[in-house]
């Protein structure tokens, strides 16, 4: 978990290590373990609302490479990131913008690389393969991987059609991929042996906004693995169907 503590001194944001008089302390998350799901939602909404299209493309890896960003563009990008930091931490944006550009980039570079970019480039996240997580003294299990009978593993095979369909529908129906994350986690992650209950999932979803964002990414990759597996199985089945039967092959010969 990577985060730094900041305070405001003489109208500027400084780390506690450099502060002379420590006032209110703010926490800046610098990875998906210290970022909460709620912060991820706010951050994504802020960037989509306030950032330019070229900045979003830059974060998604389809824009101008970092080394080619001109100083004027870097200043514009820094203002966007400072606004995003202020949005999720409560630090006044003026305290961040009062810093020199070089000092702004000390915060912005790490925040862009470890927080914003992974939200726009999901492939950067490396799944930890966790089996469960603990929240408020309760252990919640991630969707299980079950043997598929062919020497492989089938993800989410223990899920009922109802829970699988609802989580999938939420993911597909939302234009914002992070909007329904707490509910998707609540649907698919339950205590050992507990059956899916929609009302209970919706109640938990409010609490799960405070979960570390990486847990939602772990659940997302469970779903992605399942979809990939299903597509592969369908492709193999269709390929098999297109092959002539032994009798047809003999007749052709």
Image (cartoon, rainbow, N blue to C red):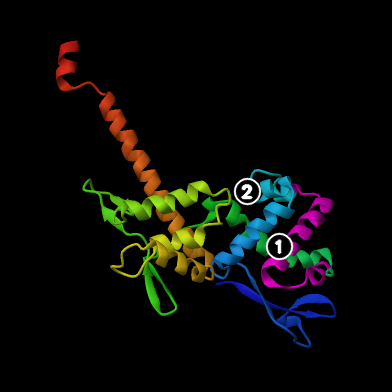
Q: Name the residue under label 2.
A: 60
Question: Mark 2 falls on what kind of element?
Answer: loop
Does residue 15 sit above or below 41 in this rendering?
below
Q: Which residue is drawn at 58% across and 68% down?
A: 35
Residue 127 vs residue 132, the one in the foreground: 132
Left of 191 or right of it: where is 102? Answer: right
Q: Quadrant of residue 118?
A: bottom right
Secondary structure mostly seen in the magenta stretch: helix
Q: Residue at x 70, y 66 (%)?
A: 87
Q: Earlier in the sequence, mark 1 or mark 2?
A: 2
Callout in the foreground (1, 2)? 1
Q: Few, some or many C-alpha atoms within 10 Å of disc 1 (few <14, some 14-19, many ≥20)?
A: many
Question: Mark 1 falls on what kind of element?
Answer: helix
Q: Is residue 253 visible?
A: no
Callouts 1 and 2 close, C-beta under 8 Å: no
Distance between the alpha carbons at the discs numbered 1 and 2 = 16 Å
Q: Name the residue under label 1.
A: 84
Residue 204 vs residue 64, the one in the foreground: 204
Left of 252 or right of it: where is 90? Answer: right
The residues colored magenta run: 68-97
Q: In which quarter of the image is residue 133?
A: bottom left
Q: Few, some or many C-alpha atoms within 10 Å of disc 2 (few <14, some 14-19, many ≥20)?
A: some
Asked if residue 82 is among those painted magenta in the image, a careful observer would answer: yes
């Amino acid at each position: 978990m990577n985060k730094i503590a900041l305070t405001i001194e003489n109208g500027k944001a400084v780390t506690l290590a450099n502060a002379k008089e420590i006032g209110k302390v703010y926490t800046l998350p610098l990875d998906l373990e210290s970022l909460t799901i709620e912060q991820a939602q706010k951050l994504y909404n802020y960037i989509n609302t306030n950032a330019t299209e070229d900045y979003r493309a830059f974060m998604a890896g389809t824009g101008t490479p970092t080394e080619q960003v001109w100083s004027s563009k870097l200043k514009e990008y820094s203002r966007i990131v400072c606004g995003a930091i202020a949005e999720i931490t409560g630090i006044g944006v003026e305290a961040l913008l009062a810093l020199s550009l070089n000092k702004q980039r000390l915060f912005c570079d790490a925040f862009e690389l470890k927080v914003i970019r992974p939200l726009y480039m999901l492939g950067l996240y490396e799944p930890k393969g966790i089996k469960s997580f603990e929240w408020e003294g309760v252990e919640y299990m991630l969707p299980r991987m079950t043997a598929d009978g062919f020497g492989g593993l089938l993800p989410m095979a223990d899920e009922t059609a109802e829970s699988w369909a609802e989580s999938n529908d939420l993911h597909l129906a939302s234009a914002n991929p992070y909007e329904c994350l707490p509910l998707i986690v609540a649907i698919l992650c339950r205590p050992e042996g507990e059956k899916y209950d929609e009302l209970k999932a919706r109640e938990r979803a409010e609490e799960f906004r405070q979960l570390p964002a990486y847990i939602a990414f772990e659940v997302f990759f469970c779903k992605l693995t399942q979809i990939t597996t299903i597509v592969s199985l369908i492709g193999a089945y269709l390929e098999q169907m297109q092959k002539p039967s032994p009798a047809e092959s003999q007749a052709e010969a």
